[in-house]
């Protein structure tokens, strides 16, 4: 904390300062229930501008409508009195920028998971009628359940108040700005797609595709040069090149990025579920957004949960994110609901399922232990089968949930003989096995 920082902001108790930028200061805080949140307080000079206040209110309201899938959801905002602020989930995990700086470029499934997750987030953001406007590696956090995009929804309000033509300032980060933004042309979702290409290229090579010695050189390269993509995974290079086309009309949409990455023509329709109020033929309406009461972070500087059993941050992100998109497709066609593992299917290390509201998560960690985490990302129940990194969890066709490795069975639920068994992670945090009639035959008793 610094001298003059508030002890409370609205109904939130301030714990620490996380950072300061052009729009405002971000604080870690907690609400009355003890849930940690991030509160972004808008700078006074912006808050005094009537045009900014009006646009900020519209953008914050639109941001609330964005589905929480792959984003840091907006929980609350003060729009009509000082200080202006917006409250978001608090994402636990390092930023992509920090992860690449400390550990090097991503590759394989980690890079693919990053590409899918960010494209899915953009689909949700664009579906709510807003644009990100400042997508960059520091605004992508690598959480335990995949990449999460933050700081969306209010950049356009900043643009309205910044008087770009008089000050010569640009809204956004130079190496991630689309060429049309530099030319003063209309800003469209295609600008975010261009930034997606830059972010994926950075993640896969460890550098921006438009490197320069100063801002002027960077802007020139963005406007005129081909992107530098040597070293990028060949499976992603062509799509990234399309996203970085100088002409916005030739870039794919966020939904088209997903279509290519996931390989399904239904992705565009599936991602409508990411935006409230969209009707889905044959599958009812998308549910209203539920804000997970989980400990989340927005500054990208946090450590893993305080427990000897840590959730993965990057490893397995591709499977988690792709599985979530696949779950949307299954839901469209009346299949298995979210938070469910059906008989004959397995969990493997770093791959898991979460409750439909995202507040509880079941994962088999890379040490082989099957763990159920609660909304604060603390373990509630575990199989006590750690030190077996090759272990796999399977809900067998006979209805028995087992953890096994090459040496044999390490743990079992004792529910063999359950026809049509399903393992369910409920919104209330219950981990249960149910039979074909929906009767509960086993419940995890908290043991941590």
Image (tube, rainbow, N blue to C red):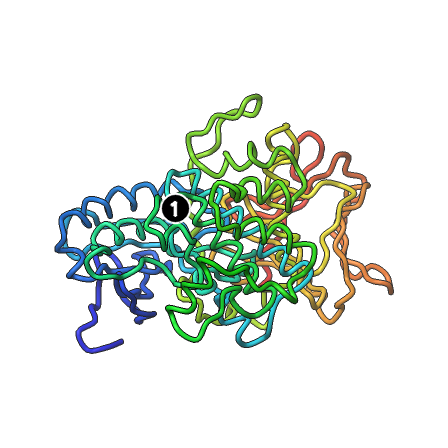
Choose between 441 and 334: the one closer to the eye: 334
Question: How many labels were placed on the picture?
Answer: 1
Q: Which part of the image, by quadrant, shows the C terminus?
A: bottom right
Q: Which of the pair 394/264 is nearer the observer?
A: 264
Q: Position of residue 334 (x, y in %)?
A: 63, 28
In screen coordinates, is 217 left or right of 370? Answer: left
Residue at the limit of the structure toward the right, as seen here: 407
Residue beneath the point at 32% across and 50% down: 184
Whether residue 63 is visible here, answered yes or no, is no
Vertical position of residue 387 compared to residue 64: above or below: below
* Disc 1 target residue: 131
Q: Is residue 348 visible?
A: yes
* Label 1: how many Cα within 10 Å (few below 14, some 14–19, many 20+): many
Question: Where's residue 305, x and y in %?
Answer: 51, 68
Residue 198: x and y in percent read 51, 59
- The quadrant of the image that shows the N terminus is bottom left
- What residue lies at 56% left-to-right and 25% top-to-bottom? 283
Coordinates of residue 339 in the picture (x, y in percent) = 60, 43
**Secondary structure found at label 1:** loop
Residue furthest out toward the front: 224
At x 67% / y 45%, what residue is drawn? 442
What residue do we see at 42% from left, 52% from top?
Answer: 293
- Please identify the quarter of the rendering in which residue 18 is found: bottom left
Taking 436 as reference, is 240 above or below it?
Answer: below
Q: Quadrant of residue 176?
A: bottom left
Q: Residue furthest top?
A: 282
Left or right: where 1 falls relative to 106: left
């Amino acid at each position: 904390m610094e001298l003059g920082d508030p002890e409370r902001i609205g109904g939130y108790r301030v714990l620490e300062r996380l950072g300061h930028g052009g729009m405002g200061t971000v604080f870690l805080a907690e609400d009355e229930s003890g849930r940690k949140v991030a509160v972004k307080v808008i700078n006074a000079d912006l808050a005094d501008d009537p045009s900014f206040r009006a646009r900020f209110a519209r953008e914050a309201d639109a941001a609330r409508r964005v589905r929480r899938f792959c984003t840091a959801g907006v929980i609350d905002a003060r729009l009509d009195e000082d200080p202006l602020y917006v409250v978001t989930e608090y994402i636990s995990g390092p930023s992509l920028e920090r992860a690449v700086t400390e550990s090097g470029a991503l590759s394989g499934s980690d890079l693919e998971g990053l590409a899918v997750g960010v494209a899915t987030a953009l689909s949700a953001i664009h579906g709510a009628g807003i644009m990100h406007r400042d997508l960059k590696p520091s605004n992508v956090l690598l959480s335990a359940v995949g990449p999460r995009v933050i700081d969306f929804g209010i950049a356009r309000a900043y643009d309205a108040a910044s008087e770009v033509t008089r000050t010569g300032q640009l809204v956004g980060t130079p190496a991630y700005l689309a060429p049309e933004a530099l030319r003063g042309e209309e800003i469209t979702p295609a600008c975010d797609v261009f930034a997606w290409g830059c972010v994926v290229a950075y993640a896969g090579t460890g550098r921006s595709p438009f490197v320069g010695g100063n801002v002027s050189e960077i802007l020139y390269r963005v406007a005129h040069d081909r992107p530098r993509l040597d070293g990028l995974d060949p499976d992603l290079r062509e799509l990234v090149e399309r996203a970085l086309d100088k002409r916005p009309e030739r870039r794919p949409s966020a939904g088209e990025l997903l279509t290519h990455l996931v390989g399904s023509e239904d992705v565009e329709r599936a991602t409508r579920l990411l935006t409230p109020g969209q009707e889905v033929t044959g599958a009812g309406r998308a549910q209203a957004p539920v804000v997970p009461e989980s400990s989340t972070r927005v500054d990208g500087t946090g450590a893993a949960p305080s427990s000897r059993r840590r959730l993965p941050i990057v490893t397995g992100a591709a499977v988690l994110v792709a599985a979530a998109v696949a779950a949307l497709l299954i839901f469209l066609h009346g299949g298995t609901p979210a938070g469910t593992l059906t008989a004959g299917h397995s969990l493997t290390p770093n791959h898991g399922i979460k409750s439909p509201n995202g507040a509880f998560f079941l994962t088999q960690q890379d040490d082989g232990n099957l763990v159920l985490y609660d909304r604060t990302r603390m373990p509630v129940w575990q199989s006590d089968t750690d030190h077996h990194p090759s272990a796999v969890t399977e809900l067998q066709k006979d209805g028995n949930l087992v953890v096994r490795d090459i040496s044999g069975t390490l743990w079992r639920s004792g529910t063999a003989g359950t026809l049509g068994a399903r393992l369910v992670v409920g919104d209330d945090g219950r981990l249960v096995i149910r039979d074909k009639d929906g009767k509960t035959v086993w419940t995890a008793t908290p043991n941590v």
